[in-house]
C-alpha cells in the first residue's frame, strides 16, 4: 500500500471516530449529577480523543516506517472504538429517555447507577484498551522518525575510535 493511501485511510476513519467520541463526551457531560462511573467513562473518552488526535497527526513518512501491519491494526482498533461508542450512545439515549434538560429522573438514575454498571465498566475497559493501542502507535511513530538511519550510529562510533587511535 502506498504511504499516502495508508495515511488517507487512517485519517478517513479517525475523523468520524473523533466526532463520535466528542458527541458522546458532550452527552455524558450534560448529565447533571451523573454517577461516578459515568464521570470516569467521560474521562476515558477524553483520553481516547487525545489518542485519536495523536494518531491523526502521524505523517505519511511515519506510517510508512511503521508498515502495513501496524496500519491495519490501527484501523481495526479505531473502527472497533467507533462501533463501541455508537452502540453505547444508542444505549445511553435509551437509558436516559425519561430525563429532561440534563437532569436524571429517578428511574434513569437507578438504571445508570445500579443496573447498567457492568455495561459502563465494559465500555470503560474497551476505551482503555483502545487508548493504549492508539497511544502506542502514536509513540512508535514519533520514536521511529527520531532514530538515526540504520548504520549511522555505528559509523559515528567507528569515527570516535579512529580519532582516539590518531591521538585526536
Image (tube, rainbow, N blue to C red):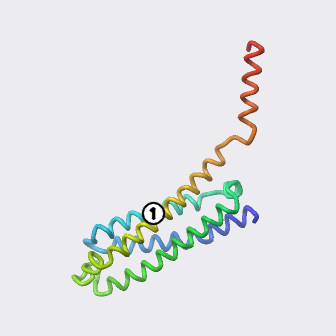
At 32% from the left edge and 67% from the top edge, which residue is drawn? 39
Measured as percent of width and height from the top left, residue 79 is found at: 56, 73
Which quarter of the figure has residue 80?
Answer: bottom right
Q: Secondary structure at mark 1?
A: helix
Report the front residue among 12 and 130.
Answer: 130
Q: Quadrant of the C terminus?
A: top right
Q: Is residue 68 left or right of residue 115?
A: right
Where 42 sits versus 114, above or below?
above
At 72% from the left edge and 28% from the top edge, which residue is drawn? 157
Measured as percent of width and height from the top left, residue 138 is found at: 57, 55
Where 109 sits versus 47, above or below?
below
At 48% from the left edge and 75% from the top edge, which residue is drawn? 84
Say few, some or many: other residues with alpha carbon within 10 Å of mark 1 (under 14 / 14 to 19 / 20 or more): some
Where 36 sits versus 27, above or below?
above
Q: Which residue is mark 1?
A: 128
Q: Quadrant of the N terminus?
A: bottom right
At 77% from the left edge and 21% from the top edge, which residue is drawn? 162
Q: How many marks?
A: 1
Measured as percent of width and height from the top left, residue 42 is found at: 38, 67
Where 148 sits versus 32, above or below?
above
Q: Is residue 14 left or right of residue 93?
A: right
The furthest residue to the top: 167
Measured as percent of width and height from the top left, residue 91 is found at: 40, 82
Which quarter of the figure has residue 124?
Answer: bottom left
Amino acid at each position: 500500500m502506498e504511504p499516502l493511501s495508508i495515511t488517507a485511510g487512517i485519517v478517513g476513519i479517525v475523523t468520524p471516530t473523533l466526532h463520535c467520541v466528542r458527541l458522546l463526551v458532550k452527552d455524558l457531560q450534560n448529565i447533571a449529577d451523573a454517577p461516578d462511573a459515568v464521570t470516569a467513562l467521560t474521562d476515558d473518552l477524553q483520553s481516547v480523543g487525545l489518542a485519536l488526535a495523536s494518531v491523526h497527526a502521524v505523517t505519511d513518512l511515519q506510517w510508512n516506517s511503521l508498515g502495513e501491519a501496524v496500519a491495519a491494526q490501527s484501523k481495526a482498533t479505531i473502527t472497533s472504538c467507533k462501533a463501541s461508542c455508537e452502540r453505547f450512545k444508542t444505549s445511553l439515549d435509551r437509558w436516559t429517555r425519561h430525563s429532561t434538560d440534563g437532569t436524571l429522573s429517578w428511574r434513569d438514575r437507578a438504571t445508570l447507577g445500579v443496573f447498567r454498571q457492568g455495561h459502563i465498566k465494559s465500555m470503560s475497559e474497551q476505551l482503555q484498551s483502545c487508548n493504549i493501542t492508539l497511544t502506542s502507535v502514536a509513540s512508535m511513530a514519533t520514536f521511529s522518525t527520531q532514530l538515526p538511519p540504520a548504520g549511522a550510529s555505528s559509523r559515528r562510533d567507528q569515527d570516535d575510535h579512529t580519532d582516539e587511535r590518531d591521538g585526536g
